[in-house]
Amino acid sequence: MEEHVEFESDGLTLDGILHIPDDYKPGEKRAAMLVLHGFGGSKNGGGAKIQAELMAKWGYVALRFDFRGCGDSEGRRGYIRCFDQVADTRNALSWLAKRDEVDPDRIGSGGGSFGAAVTVYTAGIDKRIAAAISIGGWGDGERKFRNQHPGPEKWKKFTDMLEAGRKHREETGEELMVPRWDIVPIPEHLRKNINPDSHMEFPAETAQSMMDFKADEVVGNIAPRPLLLLHSANDSVTPTEQSLEMFKRAGKPTELHLLADIDHFPFSDEGSQFVEILKGWLDNNFPATIR
């Protein structure tokens, strides 16, 4: 069952879809998962939608929602700052914990790419998150960007864009809008995985926000709660070393899986062993029901 829902975050109304398992019985308290969408996307993006549907199929209550400024949520369009999304996740957690179907002590969070970074950071500062799943995520924005814009020429072009954004804001009081691919390059053959309602332009401040965002600094705080890090062994969007570095900094129990048969959008390949790994980890570390 899917239910359209709305909840408040810092005075803004956020829009979501709540997935309730078909076998749910009134009075039960199920484990739940927040499902966070990727950079400038929405709850209707393939990864978020498929992940939420899988969670419900496996017995979890799942909430996928639009961050502020994205999808059907309120907020300035495309104005994305990492700590705003952390706040949205914590407010979604507070809302979900009050649902009759949900065990408030057993709410996890998972996401892909940008949503993965927000998941890790939020879990690192908010102990209410009982389990965390990072899919192709990142822990250090500056190091990530240096790998996404390799070499002196590309790095200078990227940092010049940040500086131009700062000057434009100081001189005009307005944001300098920049193309999506100038912030996060994605190979042409993978761009079909970007949802049609995704933003294609962002303020330069969005890139600066990502540059300053360091989930690495708090990932160690998640332990002893379980953390799963999933990444393509040869990710052509988010460098694989980002999950490797988070794994080095994480405590127990943390699992890291690198898969050779996927790229940055694992849910685009339904035959991938990725789904089997995800299901097995959940069964062992964060089951939908306690028997």
Image (cartoon, rainbow, N blue to C red):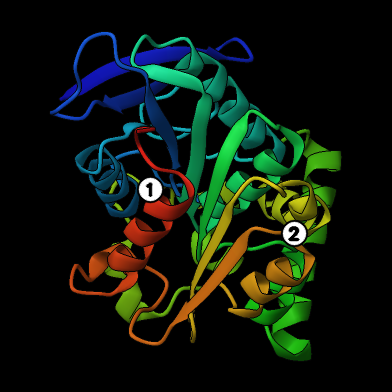
List the single residue furthest toward the front: 291
> Looking at the picture, how far across and down is residue 284, in whole percent?
43, 54
Name the image quarter holding the C terminus.
top left
| Relative to 92, residue 126 above or below | below
- Name the quadrant containing residue 93: top right
Where disc 1 sits, the SS reads: loop
Instruction: Name the mark on residue 198.
Output: 1
Residue 246 falls left or right of residue 39: right
Find out whether the residues at labels 2 and 1 contact each other: C-beta distance under 8 Å: no
The number of numbered badges drawn on the structure is: 2
Residue 257 falls left or right of residue 138: left
Viewer-nearest residue: 57 or 264: 57
Image point (20%, 22%), residue name: 24
Image point (74%, 88%), residue name: 153
> Looking at the picture, how far across and down is residue 51, in whole percent?
31, 49
User: Which residue does the numbered mark 2 point to in the structure image?
Assistant: 251
Residue 80 falls left or right of residue 64: right
Viewer-nearest residue: 23 or 150: 23
> Looking at the picture, how far across and down is residue 125, in whole percent?
76, 37
